[in-house]
Image (cartoon, rainbow, N blue to C red):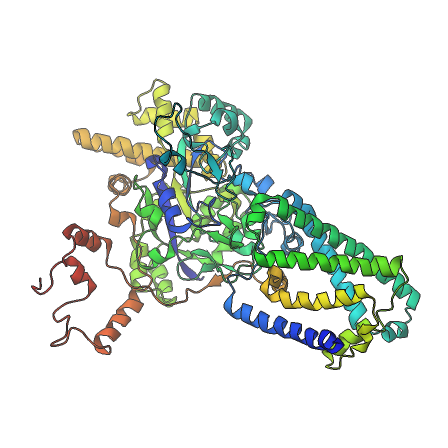
């Protein structure tokens, strides 16, 4: 048993409106540079859709993630070590720019400098951001937004292709009457990262303290095997530096106790960040379970209950600061994943044990209830519809539970029951205990879950202990005692108490 | 003159080679990369790159055998002069042709794909020009001189001089007699060594053989100086609501 702490995220898909603020602020922060024009550490996809890069979920094509070999051993889908090195001169499974998109810019001076009195409106032409040549725009990072062009392509969504034929036909039928939801994606900071395992240089690593997966830019030699190995295609080649880059989980912010940029700026307030404690020694076994559908439970089983005295003892032994243990106990991520069990991992069948989980969207189901002429406020009707229509439950199952529709339906029922319970509670003050029994929760738990999901206060969504709380405390002591103090008698800062006071208002009556 | 060309220049190049590598390793880890362009163009690269690299391995191996192993040694183990010659010339011609074809394709690809050409540095251009010239000279020496031409026994002259450079006992007179192609190829080889540390060729030294036996998942501890602790967001919000005070 080896206890480790991991910073993890949960996204509540019901609240995502697809505004792309996360993508834009992330790009402004991290990838607004030459060489990363096509790179989106955070992107928001419309599902159903083929995604970014195209068909990235088709692992027969891209060879991402892990699989079990004939003897049941866990191996990278892209092959063993020798096979990987044999492909180092040309990687046959590397997406090219065409699989992402050719980034474009516009010559806006054409508009600004257009002379007055033109008969025709001047037009700015798209130009390749790489070569400056005029190009025609045929694809983009978000070409499929809100089902754009879906009638042509979304049928080839790997999740639809891999569904049981009968269910796929029904999804397709429903889909032609349109259902959709948004799926924001960042690096999963996996417990069993395939990219790290495929890196020939050993430049990629998982941080011991917080589990963030990073690329050491000084050690990366540009062998580009990580791009192939990542089944989520969230490692990118910077074509200007010739090195791999990826989502950093905004580690400088996390270290300072602040949420990532994508979380901080999320308009729908749908992201949750917190600590999960897990047993590193259990990771390999969990990733190697035979049945794909057991992976969800196996991964949950690697997580350690932060309230368990045994966990606390292990954390103490591992030298985890008290503040981190407290944060783990208050972690919204732990609550959503393990307490309420309403968050699910994205594509657990890739066997990387991803650490960005999702609360599946209930809204498309409620639409279906309405369409079926049922009462979407009646829990019985909703339950019935979830079971009966199975749309898009089986589609969601392809995304989140390796095809186990019952597992997704169970989560949706909890969410539906919560809505009905709170509606009754708010409108006429009745406490519908029978609803709680059906989902195996108490009324108190349902209300706490409601508060976390619907009220979603800033301090409850983000519980991140600063990495440096202890360092900082000792540094402050040093500064107070040893360094020249400006606060001493006659000193220029006499009476002041440091930057926080300065920021708060006039200090010591000075003006 | 022959002393300058066959003694001073080689040592100058070797010095640049060594000091250049030390300098680059210490000061430019960030630039130490294959600088892959497969993202930008994959179709031609998938044929050309393996062709070039595998050909280059053969060529490097051939050079090692030809230059480092004295003729007396191969004869001592019973390899006749004729047998050696046949293997060396045909092996060299074959792998050399592979390498040349791969290099030609790579250069054409780089020039004709606008995206790739835009990312080509001065060092790249110097490297490709040198490699191309050297490959052509080498092929001329192997095919032109030894296969269809009069032949030249480089093992008794050029190779001896080459080894002499490393024994600190170079004999320039051995090179003066050599055909012009061999002279140019030998000199160009040392110039390539001098160019080496300043180009993407440094990736050769990072061939990831250690990958074969290291553990899959690497854990590393956070290192570096702690950042300045930030006040909690609520404090920042309150502060900005107050506006600036001074």
Residue at the extreme left of the image, as rendered: A509
Q: Position of residue B219 (x, y in %)?
A: 48, 62
Q: Is residue A328 above or below residue A359?
A: below
Relative to A502, A154 lies left or right: right
Q: Position of residue A427 (x, y in %)?
A: 18, 29
Q: Is residue B226 above or below residue B241?
A: below
Can residue A57 be seen in the rendering of this structure?
no
Q: Is residue A284 above or below residue A337?
A: below
Query: Picture quarter containing residue B221?
Result: bottom left
Of the pair A17 and B89, the residue shown nearer to us: B89
Can residue A249 be seen in the rendering of this structure?
yes
Q: How many numbered markers are drawn? A: 0
Q: Position of residue A240 (x, y in %)?
A: 51, 52
Residue at the extreme top of the image, as rendered: A373
Q: Quadrant of the C terminus of chain A?
A: bottom left
Relative to A101, A459 lies left or right: left
- Identity of the residue drawn at 17% across and 52% down: B238
Of the pair A92 and A271, the residue shown nearer to us: A92
Of the pair B4 and A89, the residue shown nearer to us: B4
Q: Quadrant of the N terminus of chain A?
A: bottom left
Query: Picture quarter containing residue A393?
Result: top left
- Identity of the residue drawn at 34% across and 17% down: A373
Q: Is residue B132 above or below residue B63?
A: above
Q: Position of residue A374 (x, y in %)?
A: 33, 20
């Amino acid at each position: 048993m080896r206890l480790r702490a991991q910073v993890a995220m949960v996204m509540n898909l019901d609240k995502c409106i697809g505004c792309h603020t996360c993508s834009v602020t992330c790009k402004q922060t991290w990838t607004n540079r030459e060489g990363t024009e096509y790179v989106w550490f955070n992107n928001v996809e419309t599902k159903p859709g083929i995604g970014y890069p195209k068909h990235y979920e088709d692992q027969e094509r891209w060879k991402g993630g892990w699989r079990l070999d004939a003897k049941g051993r866990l191996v990278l889908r892209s092959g063993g070590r020798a096979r990987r090195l044999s492909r180092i001169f040309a990687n046959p499974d590397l997406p090219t720019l065409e699989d992402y998109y050719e980034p474009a810019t516009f010559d806006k001076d054409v508009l600004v400098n257009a002379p007055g009195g033109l008969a025709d409106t001047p037009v700015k032409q798209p130009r390749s951001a790489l070569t400056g040549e005029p190009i025609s725009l045929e694809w983009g990072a978000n070409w499929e937004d809100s089902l754009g062009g879906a009638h042509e392509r979304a049928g080839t969504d790997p999740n639809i292709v891999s569904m049981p034929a009968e269910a796929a036909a029904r999804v397709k039928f429903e889909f032609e009457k349109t259902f959709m939801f948004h799926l924001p994606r960042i690096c999963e900071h996996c417990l069993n990262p395939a990219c790290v395992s495929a890196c020939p240089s050993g430049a990629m690593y998982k941080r011991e303290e917080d589990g963030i997966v990073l690329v050491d830019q000084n050690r990366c030699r540009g062998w580009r095997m990580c791009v192939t190995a990542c089944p989520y295609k969230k490692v990118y080649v910077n074509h200007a530096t010739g090195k791999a880059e990826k989502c950093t989980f905004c580690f400088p912010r996390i270290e300072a106790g602040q949420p990532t940029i994508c979380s901080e700026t999320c308009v729908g307030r749908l992201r949750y960040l917190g600590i999960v404690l897990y047993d590193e020694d259990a990771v390999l076994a969990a990733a190697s379970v035979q049945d794909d559908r057991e992976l969800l439970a196996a991964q949950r089983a690697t997580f350690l209950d932060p309230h368990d005295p045994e966990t606390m003892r292990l954390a103490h032994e591992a030298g985890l600061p008290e503040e981190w243990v407290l944060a783990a106990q208050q972690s919204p991520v732990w609550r959503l994943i393990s307490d309420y069990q309403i968050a699910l991992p994205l594509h657990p069948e890739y066997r990387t044990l991803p650490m960005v989980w999702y609360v599946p969207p209930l809204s498309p189901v409620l639409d279906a209830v309405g369409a079926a002429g049922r009462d979407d406020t009646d829990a019985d009707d909703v339950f019935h519809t979830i079971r009966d229509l199975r749309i898009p439950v089986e589609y969601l199952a392809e995304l989140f539970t390796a095809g186990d529709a019952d597992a997704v339906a169970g989560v949706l029922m909890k969410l539906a029951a919560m809505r009905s319970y709170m509606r009754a509670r708010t409108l006429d003050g009745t406490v519908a205990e029978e609803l709680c029994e059906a989902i195996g929760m108490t009324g108190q738990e349902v209300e706490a879950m409601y508060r976390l999901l619907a009220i979603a206060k800033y301090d409850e969504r983000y519980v991140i202990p600063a990495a440096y709380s202890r360092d900082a405390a000792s540094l402050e002591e040093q500064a107070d005692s040893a360094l020249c103090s400006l606060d001493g008698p006659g000193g220029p800062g006499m009476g002041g108490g440091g930057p926080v006071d300065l920021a708060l208002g006039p200090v010591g009556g000075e003006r | 003159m022959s002393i300058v060309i066959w003694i001073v220049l080689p040592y100058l190049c070797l010095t640049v080679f060594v000091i250049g590598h030390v300098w680059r390793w210490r000061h430019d880890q960030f630039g130490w990369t294959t600088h892959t362009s497969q993202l930008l163009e994959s179709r031609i690269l998938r044929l050309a790159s393996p062709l070039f690299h595998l050909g280059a391995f053969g060529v490097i191996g051939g050079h090692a055998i030809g230059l480092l192993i004295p003729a007396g040694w191969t004869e001592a183990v019973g390899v006749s002069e004729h047998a050696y010659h046949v293997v060396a010339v045909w092996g060299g011609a074959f792998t050399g042709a592979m390498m040349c074809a791969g290099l030609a394709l790579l250069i054409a690809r780089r020039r004709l794909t606008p995206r790739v050409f835009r990312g080509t540095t001065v060092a790249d251009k110097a490297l490709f020009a040198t490699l191309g010239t050297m490959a052509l000279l080498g092929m001329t020496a192997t095919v032109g001189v030894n296969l269809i031409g009069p032949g030249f026994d480089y093992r008794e002259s050029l190779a001896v001089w080459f080894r002499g450079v490393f024994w600190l006992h170079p004999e320039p007179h051995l090179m003066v007699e050599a055909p012009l192609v061999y002279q140019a190829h030998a000199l160009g080889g040392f110039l390539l060594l001098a160019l080496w540390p300043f180009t993407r060729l440094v990736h050769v030294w990072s061939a990831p053989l250690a990958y074969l036996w290291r553990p899959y998942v690497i854990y590393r501890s956070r290192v570096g100086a702690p950042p300045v602790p930030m006040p909690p967001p609520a404090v920042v919000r309150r502060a900005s609501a107050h506006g600036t005070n001074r």
